[in-house]
Amino acid sequence: MKRFKTIVRVLALVLAGSFLHYVLPQHDIVQVSQAEPRRTDFGSFNRWFYAQADSGSAEMENRDIFYIFTEKKETFLFGFVPRDSMEVMVYRNEDTGWIWPPYFKFDSSNLHGQATTQARKEPDSEGGNWAVITHYGWRIPFLSIFPNAVDIKPVEGPDVRIIPWFNIFFFIFLMVAILFVRAAWRQFRERSVDPLLDAAGHQIDEVQADVAERKGRFSRWLGTWRDKNKNRPIE
């Protein structure tokens, strides 16, 4: 039972971590090479990773979606970045509307214009015009799933340090909320749950004692009948 509880807790942590990794904003320093709309077909699974009908898109088998094509420095294990290694990264550009996740993005057309302008800029002395793309989501090529870009800002170069302030404050708030809920639950348990459990335990003990006493009386009563039968003369 203890091992089963450990497995359940690990699975819950993995699911919660994956969920937060998907919805929280991430930042990539990239070179924008192209931005254009493309007709996109949806499958039964990857449809869940695109905008829904109530965010401004009609519910259909395919539709035009803005895409941003970029290149960024390829990151290997433990964050190691080779000097001249680049990888292609593609982002979709869709409004999120009022639904989940709550980015309240309604300016996909404006963002497409910014990405197009960024792609047309002349390369600098380091070989490219760099920008920071803020996005959420994952890139899963074999399922045609793309992260959704929510913002794009030009930067001086690929070595600019980006501090994820929102994520920092979010996790601080999350830890404070968890500690608050834990303290509130302990207080509620001490005031309400534990007294009820103690009262129920006392009632169970009393019932068991009463049952034992009745059983003892019944046994003694049977014993008196046995004694009477033993002392009765045989005719």
Image (tube, helix red, strand yellow):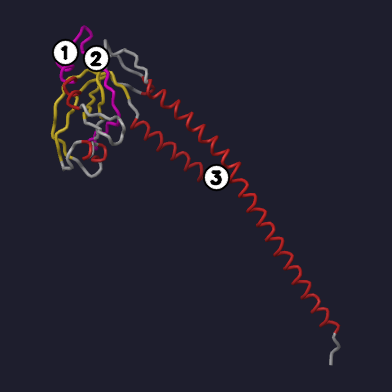
Q: Distance between the residues labelled 2 and 3?
A: 52 Å
Residue 135 or 109: which is nearer the viewer? 109
User: Local crowd at mark 2 within 10 Å, few (<14), some, or many (≥20)?
Assistant: some
Q: Which residue is drawn at 47% across and 43% down?
A: 8
Q: Distance between the residues labelled 1 and 2?
A: 10 Å
Give residue 81's quadrant in the image: top left
Instruction: Determine whether, in the image, residue 38 is placed left or right of residue 213.
Output: left
Residue 196 in the image: x percent, y percent?
A: 61, 49
Residue that badge 3 annotates: 2
Check disc 2 and give the amino acid type: Pro
- Start-end of magenta stretch: 115-144
Residue 13 or 81: which is nearer the viewer? 13
Q: In this view, does 49 lie above or below 150?
A: below
Instruction: Determine whether, in the image, residue 17 is placed left or right of residue 144.
Output: right
Whichever of callouts 3 and 1 sits on the residue coming sooner in the sequence is 3
Give residue 35's quadrant in the image: top left
Tell me the mark number nearer the camera, choosing from 3 and 1.
1
Residue, far top: 125
User: Local crowd at mark 1 within 10 Å, few (<14), some, or many (≥20)?
Assistant: few
Residue 116 in the image: x percent, y percent?
A: 15, 20
Instruction: Determine whether, in the image, residue 129 is placed left or right of residue 200.
Output: left
Residue 65 in the image: x percent, y percent?
A: 17, 32
User: Local crowd at mark 3 within 10 Å, few (<14), some, or many (≥20)?
Assistant: few
Residue that badge 2 annotates: 154
Q: Are marks 1 and 2 in contact (CB under 8 Å)?
A: yes
Q: Which residue is drawn at 66% across and 56% down?
A: 203
Q: Do the residues labelled 3 and 1 touch (CB within 8 Å)?
A: no
Q: Residue at x 26, y 40 (%)?
A: 48
